[in-house]
Structures are given as C-alpha cells and as structure tokens.
Image (cartoon, rainbow, N blue to C red):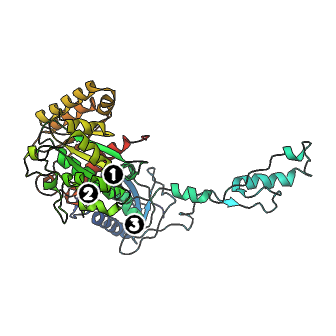
Amino acid sequence: MRDSSTEDGLHATIHPDGSAVLVIDETPSEIHTQHAEDARREIVRLTAEIARQLDAPIRVIVTEPDGEWPLVVDGDERVEYASPDGAPRPTFASAPDPAPKITRPASADADTRPVTVIDPAPTRGAGPVRSSESARSTETSRSAGPARVSARPEAEQQTPQRETFLTGIHDEDQREDPATRGFRGAMTRMGMRMGPGADERAERADQLAVAQHWPGPRTIAVVNGKGGSGKTPTTILTGAVFARFGGAGVLSWDNNQTRGTLGWRTEQGPHEATLHDMLGAADHLLSTDAQAADVANFVHHQRQDRFDVLRSQPIALASEQRVSAEDVDRIHAVAARYYRLIIMDSGNDESDPLWLRMIDRTDQLVVATTSRDEHAEAGALLLDALAERDERSAQLAANAVTVVSQADQKAPASEVRRVVDGYRKLTRDVVQIPFDPAMIDGHLHYSALRPATQRAWLAAAAAMARGFAGGE
C-alpha cells in the first residue's frame, strides 16, 4: 500500500484525557472521546473517509504522550506503520473487526531466533550445528577434496562439542513481551506486534526487581524521628507492593513502644492478637513442632494486598506494653522463620533500645517524610546521627532510600522539589509520592490509589529491593 496522500498529509494529536484533534489542511477537527483507544479508532475512520474520496491511501502522523507514529491508512481502514521518512515499514498485521484493518505479509512475524540445522552429510560425531555454521561446513566439504588425516595421535584429537538442543528455549525466555500500553499496545492488540516504550520497560524492570526472592530473609526499617511523617503509610504500601508482585511471605511489623497505629490503617484478622501474644508463643513458634500456619494466630492477613500485619496495642498505655531489645530479637527470629521480607514501622524515639535494636537487624533503611520542613529536617538529622553511631549504621544511612509523600494537596511544586533534591544528596535514591486522597484516612489499599500513585509506590519498592542486591 503506497502513500498517495497530499503533500501536507494529516496530523492528529491524542491528549492525555482521551480526546483528540485531527488537522486536515491546517483545519483542526475536534474528536470528543474519553479514551485513547476510541480516539485512535476515530482517527483511522476519518482518515479512511478521506482516502476513499481521493481513491488513494492517506498518510497521517499521530502524536501521543508516548511518542509520534506515522501511519498510512487506505479506504478500507487498513493501517500500515510507516517509517519516519515516509516509506511504509514492511511489517503489517490483520486487525479483527471492529478495529482498524491492518495487513501484513506472511513473513512479517517470522521467528528470527537462530535455528539448529542438521548437516545433510555430517562428519561423524560432529552433531547439530547452527545454520550459518552448516552453510560454511557444506561449502567446505564441496571444495576441499579428500579429507586430510591428522598426524596427531587419536587421543590428542579434539572432538567437537555437540550443541545443545535447548538453546532455542533459552532464547525464547529472553524475548521481550509486546507492548500493552499506549499506541504501541493498541497496535499490538490490532495484530502488529510492537515492543514496549521506555516508560513501560521501566515499569517492567521495577516489577521484576520487586518480584525477586532472596536467599534468606530481608528486613526493611521505615524511620523518621517526627510523628506524622508518613512512616505507617510507607510501611503498609511497601508491604502491599512486595506481596502483590513478589508473592506471599511479607510481614509489616509495628515496632513501636508508644501506641503504634499500624493496626488502625490495616484490616483485622479473626482475632485481636498483638506482638505481645506472639512473644509469649515464641518458644513454640521456633520449635520443631510448629507448623507454618501456626503464625496466623498472631498476625492479621490483608486479603486484598496479600501481606500480614503484626500489630502493637494502640489503646494500651506504653508503660503497660514495654518491649525490650531482647524481645525484638525474639520476635525477629520468629518473623525471619516464617517470612522472607520483614518491614518494620518504627516509633519516634531514636534513643529507645527497641529502636536501636531494629537498626541492628535492618538490611535496608527507608526514610519516610512529607514535604513539610519539620519532617524533612527530622529525617536528615536521623541520618546524621546514624552516620556517627558506628560503621554499619553509617552504611545503612548512605544506602538509604527516601520516600517523600506530598501530604498537602496545595503544597507548591517548588517546595516538594526542594525536599526531593535535598535528599538526593543524603541518600542513595529518592522517590516522590504524589498527593492521593485515598491515603489520607482509613484503611490503606493499593488498588484504591490513583494509577500515578501506584506507579510511584512500585518505584519506591523497587529502589528498596535493589539495595538487597548481592546481600547474603
């Protein structure tokens, strides 16, 4: 299908809200749609109408948030993806109705993986060779004449290694899944296989980082010496992301002497057990008689987000539920036996032995803060104190991840950026979480968050997971 459109061609722009505009001879035509998929179909339909009138395919350049796409559309609504210089790319596809119709030669999706071919007249013991090697071998056998006999003893002659038949399987594992988002995803659904864009690749990389299972348990500590800085939401949503993308075995633990509120913002199980109940049953839970399901008597499973919560008792006085450093060791031993990842919410007293023992058990430090000055400064002072405590604490501080949540919807962008930029100088990575009304009150659920907020929490969890790389 050759492009016989006018010199100016058509230009279409799809907006983030799903609406679009098609410009024909410098005259814009608004397309009132609410989804990008509907806008794409309408652009193809309108372009095909013009192509039927002119009895020739029309070139249209479609601009979306994720890139610019030159297409050629004919009167039957068949679509070809064209290269930027105007020449159609030789890869087309047939689209199921009612989507725009696309055609493709039969060879377009030919498997380009290396093919193992058996030489029709193989040398004894040579085994399978690659197609390119087979061609060279055949050519050599035709022109070389009688085979030469090696002067070396037979024992010294090297026998060529047989190539495994499993190479193709390994190659298949490395093939990239086609795009599912934006224009690339739409073209894939219409039959034209397209690779993902940069944003989708980055998201997939974060998902793989979070899905990793490590040899041995890992512990994350969420810290800030100021109340209201976002420690509990960070603990909850970090647990949700790791459990949703990496599977079971994730525990969020309220490690707080002074009425921790982790239990207030998460679902309660069919009991009212707290960490004190688990502490009393630690001997049994660490014994050989214990079963994996026994721990369910003491933790509260989050049915939507698939992780467990170990609660403190927020309605009791702190003096009535003191926990010692040795108790932290005991509970951590139980948690490490039943869970692959432990995320510890913390109190505000950095001198408490409970808090200090948590640091001793930590593999990845996370500083939670909002964009407010007092929260940001409290987190920075905590990092300064850890840097001076001992060598290991200093390494944790340097390798920390900072999560900056925009708690105030009206906070100026410059204020948020100032905090983010400031922490880039203090910690290994910084992730900004946008304001989201679903994070303000009540139980927190990952699925209730806006897509941009979900993406930000995934990025935050991936940053934490990358801190585990190479750990024992």
Kindly indicate whether the residue at mark 2 contacts the one at mark 1 (C-beta within 8 angstroms): no
Label 3 or label 1, whichever comes before in sequence order: 1
* Residue at image coords 20%, 31%: 382
Q: CA gap, disc 1 to disc 2?
A: 37 Å
Quarter of the figure with residue 338: bottom left
x and y, in percent, of residue 250 in the image: 31, 54
Please, is residue 212 above or below residue 120 in the view?
above
| Relative depth, front residue between 237 and 301 | 301
Would residue 266 be seen by someone viewing this image from the given angle?
Answer: yes
Q: CA gap, disc 3 to disc 1?
A: 17 Å
x and y, in percent, of residue 344 in the image: 24, 45
* Residue at image coords 33%, 51%: 66
Q: Amino acid at mark 3?
A: Arg
- Relative placement, left or right, of 321 versus 78 is left
Kindly indicate whether the residue at mark 3 contacts the one at mark 2 (C-beta within 8 angstroms): no
Label 2 or label 3, whichever comes before in sequence order: 3
Q: CA gap, disc 2 to disc 3?
A: 37 Å
x and y, in percent, of residue 154 in the image: 88, 47
Q: Which residue is denoted by mark 3 in the rendering? A: 189
Would residue 301 be seen by someone viewing this image from the given angle?
Answer: no
x and y, in percent, of residue 182 in the image: 33, 58
Q: Residues within 10 Å of mark 2 (few under 14, many from 20)?
A: many
| Tag of residue 389 | none
Q: Which residue is denoted by mark 2 in the rendering? A: 308
Q: Residues within 10 Å of mark 3 (few under 14, many from 20)?
A: some
| Tag of residue 66 | 1
* Residue at image coords 30%, 53%: 283
